[in-house]
Image (tube, rainbow, N blue to C red):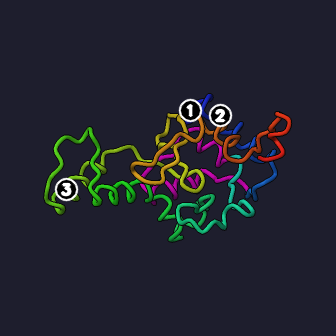
Protein backbone atom coordinates (compact mmCIF):
# COMPACT_ATOMS: atom_id res chain seq x y z
CA UNK A 1 0.00 0.00 0.00
CA UNK A 2 1.36 3.43 -0.89
CA UNK A 3 1.17 6.48 1.31
CA UNK A 4 -1.19 9.21 0.11
CA UNK A 5 1.39 12.03 0.07
CA UNK A 6 3.80 9.92 -1.97
CA UNK A 7 1.09 8.95 -4.44
CA UNK A 8 -0.01 12.58 -4.80
CA UNK A 9 3.58 13.67 -5.43
CA UNK A 10 4.07 11.02 -8.12
CA UNK A 11 0.78 11.90 -9.81
CA UNK A 12 1.71 15.60 -9.80
CA UNK A 13 5.10 14.81 -11.35
CA UNK A 14 3.39 12.74 -14.07
CA UNK A 15 0.89 15.54 -14.72
CA UNK A 16 3.69 18.09 -15.11
CA UNK A 17 5.60 15.86 -17.49
CA UNK A 18 2.53 15.12 -19.63
CA UNK A 19 1.60 18.81 -19.69
CA UNK A 20 4.97 19.70 -21.23
CA UNK A 21 4.25 17.51 -24.25
CA UNK A 22 7.95 16.71 -24.73
CA UNK A 23 7.86 13.01 -23.97
CA UNK A 24 6.24 9.93 -25.47
CA UNK A 25 4.19 8.38 -22.66
CA UNK A 26 2.76 4.85 -22.78
CA UNK A 27 0.01 3.53 -20.50
CA UNK A 28 1.20 3.21 -16.91
CA UNK A 29 2.66 0.10 -15.35
CA UNK A 30 0.28 -2.43 -13.81
CA UNK A 31 0.63 -4.07 -10.41
CA UNK A 32 1.73 -7.28 -12.17
CA UNK A 33 4.42 -5.36 -14.08
CA UNK A 34 5.69 -3.72 -10.87
CA UNK A 35 5.89 -7.13 -9.21
CA UNK A 36 7.86 -8.54 -12.14
CA UNK A 37 10.27 -5.58 -12.20
CA UNK A 38 10.82 -5.59 -8.45
CA UNK A 39 11.48 -9.34 -8.41
CA UNK A 40 13.87 -9.10 -11.35
CA UNK A 41 15.96 -6.27 -9.92
CA UNK A 42 15.56 -6.88 -6.18
CA UNK A 43 14.14 -3.54 -5.07
CA UNK A 44 10.76 -1.91 -4.47
CA UNK A 45 9.88 1.44 -5.99
CA UNK A 46 9.33 4.37 -3.63
CA UNK A 47 5.67 5.44 -3.43
CA UNK A 48 6.07 8.62 -5.48
CA UNK A 49 8.06 6.84 -8.19
CA UNK A 50 5.47 4.04 -8.29
CA UNK A 51 2.56 6.51 -8.65
CA UNK A 52 4.48 8.37 -11.38
CA UNK A 53 4.97 5.18 -13.40
CA UNK A 54 1.38 4.05 -12.75
CA UNK A 55 0.10 7.30 -14.27
CA UNK A 56 2.14 6.73 -17.43
CA UNK A 57 5.43 5.21 -18.60
CA UNK A 58 7.65 7.84 -20.25
CA UNK A 59 9.74 6.10 -22.88
CA UNK A 60 11.40 8.67 -25.11
CA UNK A 61 12.29 12.34 -25.25
CA UNK A 62 12.92 13.51 -28.83
CA UNK A 63 16.44 14.88 -29.24
CA UNK A 64 17.58 14.29 -25.67
CA UNK A 65 17.58 10.49 -25.56
CA UNK A 66 19.94 10.22 -28.56
CA UNK A 67 22.81 11.85 -26.64
CA UNK A 68 26.08 9.95 -27.22
CA UNK A 69 27.08 10.12 -23.53
CA UNK A 70 26.71 6.56 -22.19
CA UNK A 71 25.22 7.87 -18.96
CA UNK A 72 22.40 9.52 -20.92
CA UNK A 73 20.22 6.47 -21.44
CA UNK A 74 16.99 8.44 -21.36
CA UNK A 75 13.86 7.01 -19.77
CA UNK A 76 14.18 3.44 -18.52
CA UNK A 77 11.71 1.25 -20.37
CA UNK A 78 10.55 -0.96 -17.54
CA UNK A 79 8.66 -3.18 -19.98
CA UNK A 80 11.90 -4.36 -21.58
CA UNK A 81 13.22 -6.37 -18.65
CA UNK A 82 15.79 -8.24 -20.74
CA UNK A 83 17.24 -5.06 -22.22
CA UNK A 84 20.99 -4.66 -21.70
CA UNK A 85 20.45 -0.90 -21.58
CA UNK A 86 17.92 -1.20 -18.74
CA UNK A 87 20.26 -3.46 -16.76
CA UNK A 88 23.17 -1.03 -17.26
CA UNK A 89 21.01 1.87 -16.10
CA UNK A 90 19.79 0.00 -13.01
CA UNK A 91 23.33 -1.19 -12.18
CA UNK A 92 25.01 2.19 -12.83
CA UNK A 93 25.14 3.62 -9.26
CA UNK A 94 26.85 0.54 -7.81
CA UNK A 95 29.00 -0.03 -10.90
CA UNK A 96 30.28 3.54 -10.91
CA UNK A 97 30.93 3.39 -7.15
CA UNK A 98 32.97 0.22 -7.62
CA UNK A 99 34.80 1.79 -10.55
CA UNK A 100 35.72 4.78 -8.39
CA UNK A 101 36.96 2.49 -5.64
CA UNK A 102 39.13 0.62 -8.16
CA UNK A 103 40.66 4.00 -9.08
CA UNK A 104 41.54 4.68 -5.45
CA UNK A 105 38.48 6.51 -4.09
CA UNK A 106 37.20 5.34 -0.72
CA UNK A 107 34.04 6.48 1.09
CA UNK A 108 34.99 8.20 4.36
CA UNK A 109 32.42 6.30 6.43
CA UNK A 110 33.98 2.97 5.54
CA UNK A 111 37.00 3.39 7.82
CA UNK A 112 40.29 1.74 6.76
CA UNK A 113 40.90 1.22 3.08
CA UNK A 114 42.75 -2.04 2.33
CA UNK A 115 46.01 -1.45 0.44
CA UNK A 116 45.66 -4.60 -1.63
CA UNK A 117 43.33 -3.96 -4.60
CA UNK A 118 41.68 -7.41 -4.49
CA UNK A 119 40.89 -7.01 -0.77
CA UNK A 120 39.71 -3.45 -1.34
CA UNK A 121 37.30 -4.58 -4.07
CA UNK A 122 36.04 -7.51 -1.97
CA UNK A 123 35.43 -5.23 1.02
CA UNK A 124 33.72 -2.64 -1.18
CA UNK A 125 31.42 -5.27 -2.69
CA UNK A 126 30.39 -6.43 0.80
CA UNK A 127 29.74 -2.86 1.95
CA UNK A 128 27.95 -1.83 -1.26
CA UNK A 129 25.54 -4.74 -0.79
CA UNK A 130 24.11 -2.84 2.20
CA UNK A 131 23.80 0.67 0.75
CA UNK A 132 20.34 1.89 -0.29
CA UNK A 133 19.44 0.89 -3.85
CA UNK A 134 18.99 3.72 -6.32
CA UNK A 135 16.37 3.40 -9.06
CA UNK A 136 16.67 5.20 -12.40
CA UNK A 137 14.16 7.92 -13.18
CA UNK A 138 15.76 9.33 -16.35
CA UNK A 139 19.28 9.09 -17.78
CA UNK A 140 21.58 9.08 -14.73
CA UNK A 141 18.97 10.64 -12.41
CA UNK A 142 17.94 8.38 -9.53
CA UNK A 143 15.57 8.05 -6.60
CA UNK A 144 16.14 5.71 -3.66
CA UNK A 145 14.14 2.49 -3.64
CA UNK A 146 11.82 1.76 -0.77
CA UNK A 147 8.13 1.03 -0.51
CA UNK A 148 6.56 3.33 2.08
CA UNK A 149 8.97 6.17 1.30
CA UNK A 150 8.58 9.25 -0.89
CA UNK A 151 9.68 12.85 -1.31
CA UNK A 152 13.39 12.16 -1.63
CA UNK A 153 15.55 14.45 -3.78
CA UNK A 154 16.34 13.19 -7.27
CA UNK A 155 20.10 12.65 -7.53
CA UNK A 156 22.23 12.85 -10.64
CA UNK A 157 24.80 10.08 -10.25
CA UNK A 158 27.49 10.42 -12.86
CA UNK A 159 30.43 9.09 -10.83
CA UNK A 160 31.00 8.31 -7.16
CA UNK A 161 32.50 11.78 -6.72
CA UNK A 162 30.05 13.49 -9.11
CA UNK A 163 26.64 13.32 -7.46
CA UNK A 164 24.36 16.35 -7.31
CA UNK A 165 20.74 17.07 -6.38
CA UNK A 166 18.70 17.60 -9.56
CA UNK A 167 15.36 18.21 -7.85
CA UNK A 168 14.04 18.55 -4.31
CA UNK A 169 11.54 15.79 -5.11
CA UNK A 170 10.17 14.07 -8.21
CA UNK A 171 7.77 16.87 -9.22
CA UNK A 172 10.43 19.56 -8.75
CA UNK A 173 12.87 17.44 -10.74
CA UNK A 174 10.49 17.30 -13.74
CA UNK A 175 10.41 21.10 -13.78
CA UNK A 176 14.18 21.40 -13.38
CA UNK A 177 15.03 18.89 -16.11
CA UNK A 178 12.39 19.58 -18.73
CA UNK A 179 10.73 22.97 -18.27
CA UNK A 180 12.45 25.82 -20.07
CA UNK A 181 12.94 28.76 -17.69
CA UNK A 182 11.49 32.08 -18.82
CA UNK A 183 14.34 34.57 -18.72
CA UNK A 184 12.76 37.97 -18.08
CA UNK A 185 15.76 40.27 -17.85
CA UNK A 186 16.01 42.49 -20.92
CA UNK A 187 19.10 42.36 -23.10
CA UNK A 188 20.57 39.29 -21.35
CA UNK A 189 17.67 37.02 -22.33
CA UNK A 190 18.68 37.44 -25.97
CA UNK A 191 21.94 35.61 -25.22
CA UNK A 192 20.63 32.67 -23.24
Horizontal side, residue 144 vs residue 76: left or right? left
Q: Are marks 3 and 2 in contact (CB under 8 Å)?
A: no
Which picture quadrant has residue 94? bottom left
* Vertical side of 50 occupied by 59: above or below: below
Magenta region's main secondary structure? helix
Closer to the chain start, of discs 2 and 1, is 2
Q: Position of residue 78 (x, y in %)?
A: 58, 60
Horizontal side, residue 107 vs residue 25: left or right? left
Image quarter of the N terminus? top right
The answer to which of 15 and 156 lies nearer the viewer is 156
Answer few, some or many: residues within 10 Å of disc 1's Cα (few below 14, many 20 plus, some between 14 and 19): many
* Vertical side of 168 occupied by 126: above or below: below
Which picture quadrant has residue 42? bottom left
Closer to the chain start, of discs 3 and 1, is 3
Answer few, some or many: residues within 10 Å of disc 2's Cα (few below 14, many 20 plus, some between 14 and 19): many
Which region is colored magenta? 27-54
Amino acid sequence: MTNDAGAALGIEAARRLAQLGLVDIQPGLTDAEFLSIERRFGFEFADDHRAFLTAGLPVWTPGHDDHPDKASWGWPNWRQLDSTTLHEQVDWPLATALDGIQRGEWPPGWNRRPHDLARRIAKAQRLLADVPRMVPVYAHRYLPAGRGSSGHPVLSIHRLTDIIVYGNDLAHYIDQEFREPQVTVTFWRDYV
